[in-house]
Amino acid sequence: MSGVLQAKLWYAQRISAMVLGLCVAIHLLIIFYAIRGGLSAQEILGRTQGNLSFAIFYEIFVLACFVHAPIGVANILQETFPKTRLARPISGLLALLILVLGTVAVFGVYTGGAR
């Protein structure tokens, strides 16, 4: 892998980590607010269904995971199994799964399709 590509991946992982940190903090605040208010799952879904702000926020969360996790997994696999060429395909599959499953979850909560 070229040095330029390694640098770009390094920056992408660090920037996505910053976004993830902010998203996790906001997500925890939302959870604490919901728990403190004694909201049920049905009441939470009632507030989030059709709420574009929530959908955008959680899709940003999904996209940050989509960038961050596969880079780290690929690095771990390359360091652990240096003679195999499976790191990129496995991390690519992980990226696809995170993107598809995360987006489906956001869409389901937004539209109420999880009923």
Image (cartoon, grey):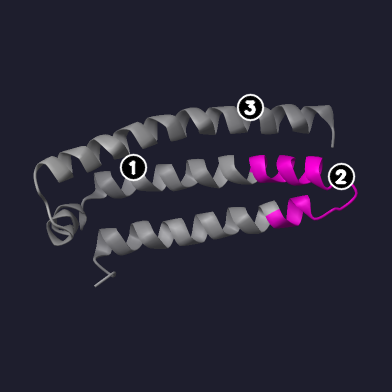
Q: Give the number of the disc on residue 57.
A: 1
> Which of the 4 image quarters holds residue 109?
bottom left
Per the image, label 2 sits on a secondary structure element best described as loop
Does the segment drawn in magenta span residue 89? yes
Amino acid at circle 2: Pro
Amino acid at circle 1: Phe
Per the image, label 3 sits on a secondary structure element best described as helix
Marks 1 and 3, how far apart at CA: 22 Å
Looking at this view, is 5 or 23 the one in front? 23
Q: Give the number of the disc on residue 88.
A: none
In the image, residue 108 lies at what x, y percent?
32, 64
Residue 50 visible in image:
no
Amino acid at circle 3: Tyr
Residue at image mark 2:
82
Counting other residues with Cα less than 10 Å from the Cα at mark 2, is it few (<14), some (14-19), or many (20 or more)? few
Q: Give the number of the disc on residue 11.
A: 3
Residue 73 visible in image:
yes
